[in-house]
Amino acid sequence: MKRLFIGFLGVFTFSFVSSLAFAEGGEFDHKKWAERALDKIKSPINEGWSFDLESRDGKNINIERYDASKPEGERWTLVRVKGKNPKKKDISKYRKRKAEELERRKERLAEAAAKDDTVDESAEGNAKENGEVNAGIDRDSIEFSREESEDYVYSFAPEIDEDINPHVRGEMRVSKTEPIIKSLEMFSIEKFSKGPAKIKEARFHIEFTAVNENMVFLSKNAVMLDGKAYLLVSIDQDSEQTYSNFSKAVLSD
């Protein structure tokens, strides 16, 4: 009886969640499902969460810690540099760079306020600075592609750069049981040029982790580039950023 009840509850839950994305005609609204998943992407910094950030560039690995419970300007800590404990000069350079990043953000916000404009701070800076990625998706282009065992897969047109957009395509995976985005993949479909760089292949892989049913954080951001600049300089980028150990900060009075 207990097993039967649990089974019924699981079917009921799936049916209820799925019904939230059905159109009036009774057909599953994939566009709505995908957009609801995208709306859950948040910045841990803006939401007051702490986390670790591991950056890998080739064989070099750096680790940073963001502690949301500390005063502004003291929240970032350099933990490891190239796999080793940071030296005093490393810490000094790091603190100076973080102070400059914070100052630039404040200047941008002040300029926007002076223009009586609305600024979404989560879109400012880069992934390393604010702990989130701009999904870079043209929502009007989202189309259902295929169904897999656990996910729906959607295709989309990336919004990275006007010179790059025509040469890349994207896919996103969303859970079938609830509108939670799992990953984004953006990849080149042909060679292209950007300024002096001629790119043979480009791939951007992004993963997410759900911290609760309404909030998803970036957990991995990997970039692979293969090409040349000025015909002679080789471009061989293989970098990755991993966000982990998320915890909601407890602010002291």
Image: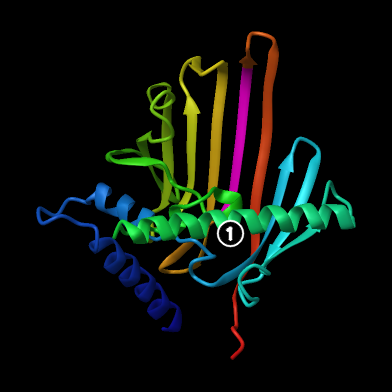
Quadrant assignment, res 142: top left
> Foreground: 160 or 121?
121
Q: Give the residues in magenta.
A: 219-227
Query: Which residue type does callout 1 highlight?
Result: Leu
For the point 27% across and 68% down, the residue is 16
From the image, which quarter does the C terminus lie in?
bottom right
- Image check: 96 left or right of 37? right
Q: Residue at x 54, y 44 (%)?
A: 206
- In magenta segment, residue 246: no
Q: How is the image coloured?
A: rainbow
Compared to 29, does 146 lie above or below? above
168 lies above or below 154: above
- Confirm whether residue 89 shows in the render: yes
Residue 83 place in picture, x, y as percent: 85, 49
Q: Residue furthest left?
A: 25
Q: Position of residue 242 (x, y in %)?
A: 65, 51
**Which residue extends farthest bottom?**
253
Q: Secondary structure at mark 1?
A: helix
Residue lying farthest to the front in this orientation: 114
Residue position for label 1: 102
Q: Quadrant of the N terminus?
A: bottom left
* Residue 221 among magenta residues: yes
Compare residues 7 and 20 and report the one nearer the observer. Answer: 20
Residue closest to the eye, 149 or 106: 106
- Tell me: 149 left or right of 126: left
Question: Depth check: 194 or 170 in front?
Answer: 194
* Residue 57 against residue 43 in the figure, above or below: above
Q: What residue is at 41 percent from the left and 29 percent from the top?
A: 169
